[in-house]
């Protein structure tokens, strides 16, 4: 069999802009946040606690709700901000916010007993470390 008749082709591998990569990582982080929280509603007693006005040991108040929304608004905004901020501000904003949310993710898993939560936190942590890594390794432009 002759190799002359075979057409060798390779799949095109386009270089993806670092902004799109980091933005996609934030999207994945947000999906995990949502799913981990939704799965938490299926834990025995979770709905009863919510009906009693409690989340974990915290009272559900306007302050709690606003704080929770602010906490989830920041990574949601990072999806957009990563695409529009100038490179230097983008790089440092992503590094700082990702490190902060990495600490939050680790802190939230302390004392947890459900394996899905550990898995979700571990994947979130890996994604946030990747945000930091890609932001840290932001491509330099030749002057």
Image: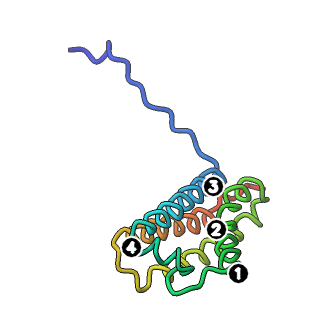
Disc marking residue 23:
3
Which residue is located at x 77 percent, y 54 percent?
84
Q: In the displayed structure, would residue 3 be above or below residue 55?
A: above
* Circle 2 Cα neighbour tier, 10 Å, few/some/many (<14 / 14–19 / ≥20): some
* Circle 4 Cα neighbour tier, 10 Å, few/some/many (<14 / 14–19 / ≥20): some
Image location of residue 127, percent across then percent down: 50, 64
Q: Is residue 121 left or right of residue 101?
A: left
Label 3 SS: helix
Image location of residue 124, percent across then percent down: 49, 67
The alpha-carbon separation of the residues under discs 2 and 1 comes to 14 Å
Label 2 SS: helix
Name the one closer to the observer, 29 or 8.
29
The alpha-carbon separation of the residues under discs 4 and 2 comes to 19 Å
Quarter of the image where the C terminus is located: bottom right
Q: Earlier in the sequence, mark 2 or mark 1?
A: 1
Image location of residue 28, percent across then percent down: 53, 56
Disc marking residue 118:
4
Disc marking residue 127:
none
Q: Earlier in the sequence, mark 3 or mark 1?
A: 3
């Amino acid at each position: 069999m002759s190799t002359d008749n075979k057409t060798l082709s390779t799949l095109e591998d386009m270089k993806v802009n670092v902004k799109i990569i980091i933005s996609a990582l934030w999207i994945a982080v947000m999906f995990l946040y949502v799913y981990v929280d939704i799965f938490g509603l299926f834990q025995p007693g979770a709905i009863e606690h919510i009906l009693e006005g409690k989340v974990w040991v915290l009272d559900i108040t306007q302050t709690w709700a606003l704080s929770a929304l602010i906490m989830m608004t920041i990574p949601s905004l990072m999806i957009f901000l990563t695409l529009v901020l100038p490179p230097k501000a983008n790089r440092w904003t992503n590094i700082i916010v990702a490190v902060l949310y990495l600490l939050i993710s680790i802190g939230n898993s302390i004392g947890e007993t459900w394996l899905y939560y550990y898995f979700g936190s571990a994947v979130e942590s890996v994604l946030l470390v990747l945000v930091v890594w890609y932001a840290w390794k932001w491509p330099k432009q030749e002057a």
